[in-house]
Image (cartoon, grey):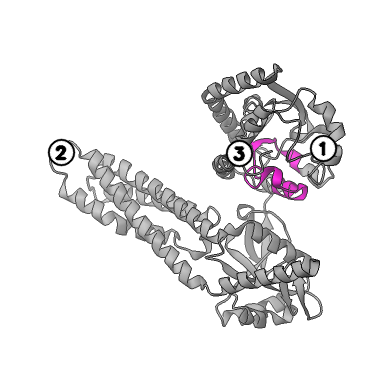
C-alpha cells in the first residue's frame, strides 16, 4: 500500500510539474502588469473626476483647465508610480514593498504639485488637490489589493507560479518545499533539487533530486526552471556561487541566495560591501523606546474603542452562556506574559463548569504535538461555546487585558504556566514581548498548526514586529475569523 501511495504521489507531482511547465513567467507577469497599469490609470481618472465633481459641484460648468488636468492625471500618475518602482516584477504578489511604493508615489506627487505651484506661482485649487491625490492613492492601493488577492487564488490553483530548483542540503530543501506548498501565495514551486553530497537520483519530500551542486545549470534546463534558490550550504563556496551566477546569466534564470539566518525580515537587514564582500548586516529588534510607546498607545486607544463598539456582543454572549447552564459567563485563567510575568486573562466560558477536572481523563486524546493540549471535538465544549469559538467571540474579553496593559492587540499566543515551564531557551524568546489577542498564529491556521510551526511563527513576529506588521495581521485576522479555519 505504501508503494502504491508513493507511486501515486510521484504521478501527482509529475502532473503538477507538467502543468506548471506549460506556463512561462514572462507571459503571466506581463499580463499581470498590464492589469496593474490599467487599474492605476482608472484609479487616477476616478480620483480626478471625483475631485472635479466635489470641488466644482456648485459651478454650472467646471473650469476647463481642471477638466484637462483630471484627464491627464492618469498619465502623470503612471509616470510617478514608475519612478517610484511600483512596477517592479520582484514584488508581485508578496510583501509590502508594492503598496509602500504606491504610497510613496502619492506623497511625492502631492509634494511635487505643491512645490511646482509655489515656484511658478500657479493658482491651483487646494480643495481639488486635497481630494484628488489622496483619493487616487487610496483607490490604487485598494485596486492592487484586489488584484493581489485574485493572483493568490490563481496560485492556489497552480497558476502563475515560478519553477524553482532548490540547492542545498536535503533537510533544508525539504523545509523549503513544505513551506512553499503551504504558502502558495509566494508563487514559487520547487520542481527539482540539487543536494550537497554525491551525485545521484532520488527524492526529498516528493521533490526529485537530480545530481549535486555541480549539476544546477543542467537541471535548470532539464526542468525548464526560471529560478534557482541556493539555501544555506557551506559546500557552495563564494567562488562556486559566482560561477553559478555566470552560468544562469546566459539563460536569464533568476538566482536567489538564502542566508543561514532564519525568519529575519528585510527591514532589519542591510547589505554593505566590505573589502569586496557583500556582508549582510542585521539590526537588533527594538523592544524598548519610542516604537514600543507608540505600540502601547495604539493598543490602548484601539482596544478601548473596540470595547465600546463590541458592548452589545458582550451582553448577548454573556446572556447566552448564562441561559445555557447557569454558570458564569467569564472564564478567568492565569497566563504568562512579557518577561515571564503571570497575569489573569479573561475569556467567555466555552466549556462545562468542571472542564479542568475532566482534562486529566482526556490527556490521552490530545491531538496536538509539543506542549499544547488541543482536541478537535473536545467533549467539554458546550453548544454555545462551539459557536463562540467558531467566530472567535470567546477571545473578545481579552480586550480588557489589552486596555490594562497585560496584553497587546498583536503578539505571540499567551501561554499557560505549565506550558511556559516546559519552554527551552529557544522558545522562551517569545516571552520578550507581550502576548497578543491575535498574531501570525491566528492568521496562519490557529489550532491546525503544529507546535513547531506555532513557535516559528511567534518567533518570526518577535524578530520582525512593527506597527505596519500589526496592521497587516489585524486586517488578515478578519478574514481568518470569517473563514473559521483552525477554530476549535
| Residue that numbered label 2 is attached to | 59
Quadrant where the N terminus lies? bottom right
Circle nearer the N terminus (1, 3): 3
Taking 106 as reference, is 413 above or below it?
A: above
Circle nearer the N terminus (1, 2): 2
Quadrant where the C terminus lies? top right
State the residue lying farthest toward the left: 60
Say whether residue 451 is magenta. Answer: yes
Give the number of the mark in front: 1 or 2.
1
- Of residue 333 and residue 122, the one placed in the foreground of this image is 333
Name the side, left or right, on which 74 lies relative to 146: left
| Residue that numbered label 1 is attached to | 419
- For the point 62% across and 58% down, which residue is it? 270
Q: Secondary structure at mark 2?
A: loop
- For the point 43% across and 58% down, which residue is it? 84
- Of residue 1 and residue 413, the one placed in the foreground of this image is 1
What's the distance in space between the residues labelled 2 and 3, CA to CA? 47 Å
Residue 197 image position (x, y, % from top left): 81, 76
- For the point 62% across and 66% down, which residue is it? 189
Q: Secondary structure at mark 3?
A: helix
Label 2 crowding class (10 Å Cα cut-off): few <14, some 14-19, many 20+? few
Say whether residue 338 is magenta. Answer: no
Taking 292 as reference, is 230 above or below it?
A: below
Amino acid at each position: 500500500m505504501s508503494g502504491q501511495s508513493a507511486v501515486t504521489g510521484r504521478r501527482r507531482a509529475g502532473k503538477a510539474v507538467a502543468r506548471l511547465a506549460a506556463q512561462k513567467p514572462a507571459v503571466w507577469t506581463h499580463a499581470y502588469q498590464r492589469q496593474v497599469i490599467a487599474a492605476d490609470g482608472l484609479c487616477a481618472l476616478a480620483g480626478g473626476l471625483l475631485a472635479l465633481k466635489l470641488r466644482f459641484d456648485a459651478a454650472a460648468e467646471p473650469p476647463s483647465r481642471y477638466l484637462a488636468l483630471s484627464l491627464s492625471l492618469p498619465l502623470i500618475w503612471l509616470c510617478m508610480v514608475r519612478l517610484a518602482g511600483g512596477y517592479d516584477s520582484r514584488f508581485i504578489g508578496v510583501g509590502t514593498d508594492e503598496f509602500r511604493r504606491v504610497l510613496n508615489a502619492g506623497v511625492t506627487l502631492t509634494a511635487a504639485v505643491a512645490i511646482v505651484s509655489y515656484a511658478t506661482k500657479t493658482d491651483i485649487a487646494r480643495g481639488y488637490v486635497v481630494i484628488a491625490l489622496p483619493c487616487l492613492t487610496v483607490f490604487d492601493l485598494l485596486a492592487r489589493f484586489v488584484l493581489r488577492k485574485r493572483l493568490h487564488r490563481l496560485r492556489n490553483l497552480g497558476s502563475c507560479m515560478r519553477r524553482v530548483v532548490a540547492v542545498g542540503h536535503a533537510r533544508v530543501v525539504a523545509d523549503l518545499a513544505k513551506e512553499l506548498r503551504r504558502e502558495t501565495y509566494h508563487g514559487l514551486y520547487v520542481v527539482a533539487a540539487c543536494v550537497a553530497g554525491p551525485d545521484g537520483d532520488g527524492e526529498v519530500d516528493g521533490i526529485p533530486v537530480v545530481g549535486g551542486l555541480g549539476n544546477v545549470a543542467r537541471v535548470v534546463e532539464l526542468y525548464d526552471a526560471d529560478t534557482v534558490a541556493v539555501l544555506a550550504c557551506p559546500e557552495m563556496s563564494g567562488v562556486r556561487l559566482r560561477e553559478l551566477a555566470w552560468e544562469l546569466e546566459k539563460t536569464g534564470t533568476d538566482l536567489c541566495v538564502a542566508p543561514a539566518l532564519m525568519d529575519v525580515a528585510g527591514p532589519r537587514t542591510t547589505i554593505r560591501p566590505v573589502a569586496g564582500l557583500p556582508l549582510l548586516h542585521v539590526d537588533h529588534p527594538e523592544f524598548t523606546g519610542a516604537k514600543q510607546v507608540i505600540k502601547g498607545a495604539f493598543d490602548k486607544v484601539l482596544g478601548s474603542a473596540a470595547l465600546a463598539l463590541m458592548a452589545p456582543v458582550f451582553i448577548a454572549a454573556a446572556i447566552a452562556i448564562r441561559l445555557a447552564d447557569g454558570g458564569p459567563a467569564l472564564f478567568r485563567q492565569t497566563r504568562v506574559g512579557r518577561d515571564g510575568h503571570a497575569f489573569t486573562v479573561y475569556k467567555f466560558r466555552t466549556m462545562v463548569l468542571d472542564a479542568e477536572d475532566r482534562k486529566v481523563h482526556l490527556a490521552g486524546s490530545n491531538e496536538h504535538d509539543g506542549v499544547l493540549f488541543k482536541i478537535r471535538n473536545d467533549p467539554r465544549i458546550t453548544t454555545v461555546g462551539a459557536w463562540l469559538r467558531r467566530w472567535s467571540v470567546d477571545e473578545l474579553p481579552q480586550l480588557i487585558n489589552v486596555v490594562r496593559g497585560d496584553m497587546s492587540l498583536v503578539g505571540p499566543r499567551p501561554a499557560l504556566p505549565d506550558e511556559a515551564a516546559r519552554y527551552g531557551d529557544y522558545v522562551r524568546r517569545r516571552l520578550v514581548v507581550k502576548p497578543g489577542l491575535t498574531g501570525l498564529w491566528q492568521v496562519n491556521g490557529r489550532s491546525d498548526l503544529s507546535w513547531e510551526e506555532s513557535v516559528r511563527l511567534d518567533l518570526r513576529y518577535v524578530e520582525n514586529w512593527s506597527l505596519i506588521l500589526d496592521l497587516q495581521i489585524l486586517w488578515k485576522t478578519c478574514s481568518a475569523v470569517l473563514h473559521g479555519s483552525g477554530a476549535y
